Image (cartoon, rainbow, N blue to C red):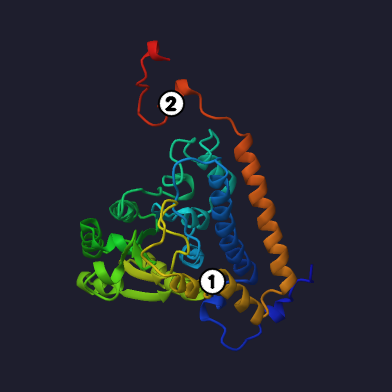
Amino acid sequence: MSQPLTAAADAAPRPNRPAVYDRLSPAQLREALRRMMLVRRFEEGAEEAYMRGLIHGTMHLSIGQEASAIGICTPLEQRDYITSTHRGHGHCIGKGAEVKRMFAEFFGKETGYCKGRGGSMHIADPAMGNLGANGIVGGGIPIAVGAALSAKRRGTGSVVVSFFGDGANNEGAFHEALNMASLWKLPVIFVCENNNYGMSTSMARSTSVPNVADRAAAYGMPGVIVDGNRFADVAEASFQAVERARRGEGPTLIESKTYRIRGHSRSDRNRYRTKEEIESWQGRDPIRLFEEELLELGVMRSDDVAALRAEVEAEIAAAIDFARESPSPDLSALTRDVYTRDIIPEAAR
């Protein structure tokens, strides 16, 4: 392990240093990289467990979108909220979720965030401001607006981030929510993670404008397009949108142009896109790009990165062990925490 960088070295100006890095300490940048690695290894670990028959059902992986999730969440505080999507593992980790409890939820265990009853698409942790992932396309957008209205009425200073995919920008809820948020100047940031495909339908075939952010103009709010594979670009846009929301100036629509390397879900055979397209995006891996940038700027050294990677591997291995060893729900408690009262007749237990 190398010696820590000195404060003078950390503060020294460097060529092409992104402006947002002046907002973040070396420790915060290291933590951002760690979380991006954690998202990647969490999903790879979940994929491996699925292939081994340890996880059932399906899952939607965000491998390739890590900079988008972590960059957006970087300015957020515990008092802030997010709503997520069916592809929301990165959002959960960005908002501070423990991977051991996430794996436990995948494994259907009592120690999971939803006590094994939500699975991959419905992880929530209100205590950390995670109002939940959502299997309904665009389903989290109006929830975010409601939370933002509550925050404004209560004067908490909280902001709300609503993550959604490009497919959701053609849902009625998207347009209704943006209109209401702008009309009432609510502290909400709409984040479209545009990975080019809504299931197997390309953006070009489904949307009448070239960019989702173009639609912001119709609702009187800023529309910002960022390179979703560049942590610095995403984080800078998020800081500006969060600050605007806290000042009471209303919402922002951020379009993060990124890509999912895996298919829509585990059953996706990828017949609607070419191998060359996937490989071209793999060449812009967001974790590698971020690592290279931090190395070039002298924020980290190669052995620091290697140590960080080993730290993440150990955390993932321990999390999977935790999930496997955790107790499964008892069948007699099938509907506990699902309904407001127990609906299983005594005779059926």
Residue 294's quadrant in the figure? bottom right
* Residue 345 visible somewhere in the drawing: yes
Quarter of the image with the N terminus in it: bottom right
| Residue 155 against residue 10 in the figure, above or below | above
Question: Along the line of sight, which residue is nearer the eye, 245 or 189?
Answer: 189
Task: Determine whether the residue tagged by mark 2 lies in a helix, strand or loop.
Answer: loop
Which x, y percent locates residue 344? 37, 19
Q: Residue at x 42, y 31 (%)?
A: 337
* Residue 297 visible somewhere in the drawing: no
Give the numbered dot on residue 44: none
Residue 303's quadrant in the figure? bottom right
- Lateral position of residue 253 relative to residue 331, left or right: left
Quarter of the image with the C terminus in it: top left
Q: Residue furthest bottom?
A: 15
For marks 2 and 1, give the one nearer the viewer.
1
Which x, y percent locates residue 63? 50, 61
Question: Along the line of sight, which residue is nearer the eye, 41 or 197?
Answer: 197
Looking at the image, tell me whether mark 2 or mark 1 is earlier in sequence order: 1
Give the numbered dot on residue 285: 1
Characterize the local packing of mark 1: few (<14), some (14-19) or many (20 or more) Cα atoms within 10 angstroms: many
Which x, y percent locates residue 220? 23, 72
Which x, y percent locates residue 188? 34, 61
Question: Along the line of sight, which residue is nearer the eye, 200 or 137?
Answer: 200
Task: Determine whether the residue tagged by mark 1 lies in a helix, strand or loop.
Answer: loop
Q: Residue at x 71, y 81 (%)?
A: 8
Give the numbered dot on residue 334: 2
Residue 293's quadrant in the figure? bottom right
* Alpha-carbon span between mark 2 and mark 1: 42 Å
- Lateral position of residue 21 relative to residue 256, left or right: right
What amino acid type should be assigned to the residue bearing mark 2?
Leu
Q: Residue at x 34, y 21 (%)?
A: 343
